[in-house]
Image: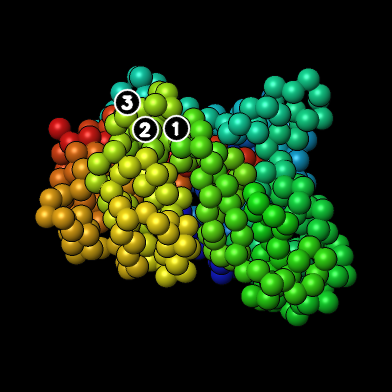
Amino acid sequence: MTTRPARRSPRPETTRPAAREEVLLDVGAPAHGGHCVARTTDDPDGRVIFVRHALPGERVRAVMTQKTSKIWRADAIEILSASPDRVEPVWPQAGPGGVGGGELSHVALGAQRTWKRWVLADCLRRIGGPDVAQAVTEAAGGTAVSVEPLPSEVRAEASEDARTRALAGTGTRTRLALTADERGRFGMHAFRSSTVLDPGRLPLAVAAIADLGLTERALWRRHARPGSRLEAVAPSVGEPLVLIDGRVLTAEGRAASRRRVGEVVDASGLGLGELRYSVHADGFWQVHKDAPAALVDAVVRAVVTGSPSGGGASLVADRVAGTSVLELYSGAGLFTLPLAAAGARVVSLEGSAQAVGDARRTLHGYDTVSLHTGRASARAVDELGRLDGTPADVVVLDPPRQGAGREVIEAVAALGPRRVVLVACDPAALARDLGSLLHSGYTVRGVRALDMFPHTHHFETVVVLDRH
């Protein structure tokens, strides 16, 4: 998802029970959002409770954290019968009552991907409906879609060193955000809360960020006041930067002269060599160090071949030249650059003027690209998709978490491209958008799910659809 906001407001405080209430739960299947479906041990057919920090098949003691007329939530605080997939958490501070952002760190990494596979299949069936579920299953070869690890996780899990294997999925985040508490100490929000807690050593961050000591050193507190926002960026080119309330600082805490960072994406597997991007330090970029290259490879292959995986490097130069592409929610040009470099004619639309400015700087010199700022809408799709008088051959969409929505999807279908490539970071939104595309005459041709957010419930899915 290339248009996820760089800044997020803290989630509203959860409605908590008036008095501490503990329950014994038998834990069932995972649910979208990092919970499992559970019921009390003395009422197996009773009300569903969504429990965090548990695993399917476990029996746990849990404390209720939310009770409304619509939903009950709880945190597992004692494991009475443990799953074989339970491991020592790589981020204990993200456990019960702790910070958000590491809700699956107690789950073995392979089991996390199984968890996400179940959630994807459930959302496709329950939200998209049987036609969507069947279409995706057939495109995946008759089975549920596997969620694939990124290269750094593959290497770590294959290591002969036990500690390296145990820490697989950590040290991968090149961006993070912190908030100062009332004492000016930087921390992270508790789950569904505005309370700021100490997150510990930030195990998901790459070493260049972890070594800054953002939560420990007085150096950073000198620049803070209660509620200050800190963003740390470790680009693939150059030293890390720290932004505090918009002020850009070096790793030594001095004012920085640069507000942009350079990113390099290895696209040699597509025959495109290294792709170089210029991005504002506070602009959006995929957070996992392997994610930009993995997504570029999947999306460009999908545009060219109809499959987001496999194939050789020569296919790009041989088959994409002259293809017209309408790209919606294009961000800072992550996909625009490789498509243009491969010879496609690209018209892009992005809501953030800053992101469009970044893309313009990156794509300077490409006369086959037309960059536009604005909201994705039916009118925009119709106008931009027919700039040369004929509909675009391919539409690429990478919408924010809520998905593209029916208006945009139906406008894309009305445009009539022969192929649609949909990138989704939320399986529920994906199911809804796929339902609209299938209803409008498209067939799922290929699908690939990538575990770009280990130790959390998030993942990314790339789906290719062709008009029949």
Question: Which residue: 71% across, 41% down?
Answer: 170
Q: Nearer the viewer, residue 105 or 321?
A: 321
Residue bearing the label numbered 2? 316
Q: Position of residue 467 (x, y in %)?
A: 18, 36
Residue bearing the label numbered 1? 270
Query: What is the three-letter code of the residue carrying label 2?
Result: Val
Circle nearer the viewer, 3 or 2: 2
Circle nearer the viewer, 1 or 3: 1
Disc 3 element: helix
Query: What is the three-letter code of the residue carrying label 3?
Result: Ala
Disc 1 element: helix
**Where's the C terminus, which quadrant?**
top left
Query: What is the three-letter code of the residue carrying label 1?
Result: Leu
Residue bearing the label numbered 3? 139
Q: Position of residue 330 (x, y in %)?
A: 39, 55
Q: Position of residue 139 (x, y in %)?
A: 32, 25
Inter-mark Cα distance, 1 to 3: 23 Å
Q: Is residue 167 above or below residue 346?
A: above
Colour convention: rainbow
Query: What is the residue that sits farthest to the bottom in this orientation?
Result: 225
- Specify the label residue 168 is tagged with: none
User: Could you tell me if residue 196 is visible in this image?
Assistant: no
Q: Position of residue 446 (x, y in %)?
A: 33, 29
Question: Which residue: 82% across, 30% down?
Answer: 163
Query: What is the residue that sits farthest to the left in this orientation?
Result: 389
Q: Using the rendered view, name the quadrant where residue 339 is placed.
A: top left
Dots 1 and 3: beta carbons under 8 Å? no
